[in-house]
Image (tube, grey):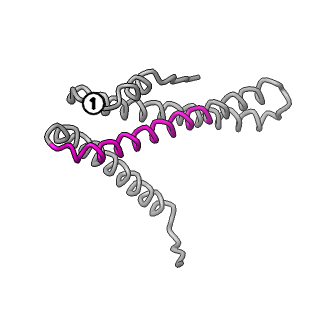
Amino acid sequence: MTRVKLTLAERDIYIMHIENQMELKKKLLLEKNQSLNKNVKYNNILQHIRNDYQKYYDYIIQQKKEQMQALNILNNYIQELTNNGNLSENNIIDAKFEQKKILNEIKSVKNNMEHFLKQISQDDTNDDTYLNNKSINERQQLPLKTV
């Protein structure tokens, strides 16, 4: 494996490119799911593919829930550290900076998940023969804890 050395700017551009590619893939999957939901009415064989998409979406939603829980745990831990008074002035400043980053990440994950759920809900309302009503109800009742 060859290691490539990049400047900071090149690395940032590379990371942005990867993030853009990931976003395009997400959009492509949602578009394919929408198309599949429309066509499943006319072709029962597509039902299995649709079930696979449903499993994928449920997996993504579960990952987002777990990510939110982990970030909230980290946030609470940092809050406890800063409140107990055993940190130096510099450590308190660092802790508050890290806590701000965590809160921004929580907000980002929450917005990402809400957007994802909105897309799926739009697909569900466009298709009156949706298979997994229980799963839909679970997704709509996600506890989104913010600090």
Image check: 75 left or right of 11?
right
Task: Give how far across and how far down residue 6 sits, in percent.
Answer: 50, 68
Relative vertical location of residue 135 with respect to residue 22 in this rendering, above or below: above
**What residue is at 42 percent from the left and 35 percent from the top?**
112
> Main structural element of the magenta stretch: helix, strand or loop?
helix
Q: Is residue 111 magenta?
A: no
Which is more toward the observer, 59 or 18?
59
Residue 29 drawn above or below residue 62: below
Q: Nearest the camera: 90 or 77?
A: 77
Question: Where, by quadrant of the figure, is residue 123 drawn?
Answer: top left
User: In the rendered view, would you say 147 is above or below 35?
Assistant: above
Q: Vertically, is 50 above or below 25?
A: above
Q: Specify the amino acid type for callout 1.
A: Tyr
Q: Secondary structure at mark 1?
A: loop
> Which residue lies most toward the left here?
42
Residue 126 picture location, percent across and down: 20, 29
Farthest-out residue, right: 86
Magenta stretch: residue 53 in it? yes
Mark 1 nearby-residue class (10 Å; few <14, some 14–19, many ≥20) = some
Total numbered badges shown on the rendered structure: 1
Residue farthest along the front direction in this orientation:
44
Where residue 121 appears, x then y in whole percent?
31, 28
Range covered by the magenta-colored residues: 43-70
Q: Is residue 65 left or right of residue 86?
A: left
Dot 1 corresponds to which residue?
130
The residue lying at 45 percent from left, 21 percent from top is: 141
**Coordinates of residue 75 in the picture (x, y in percent):** 66, 31
Q: Looking at the figure, which quarter contains the C terminus? A: top right
Q: Residue furthest bottom?
A: 2
Q: Residue 30: which quarter of the image?
A: top left
Is 8 left or right of 135, judged from the image as shown?
A: right
> Which residue lies at the image location 22% right of the left edge and 47% below the top edge?
45
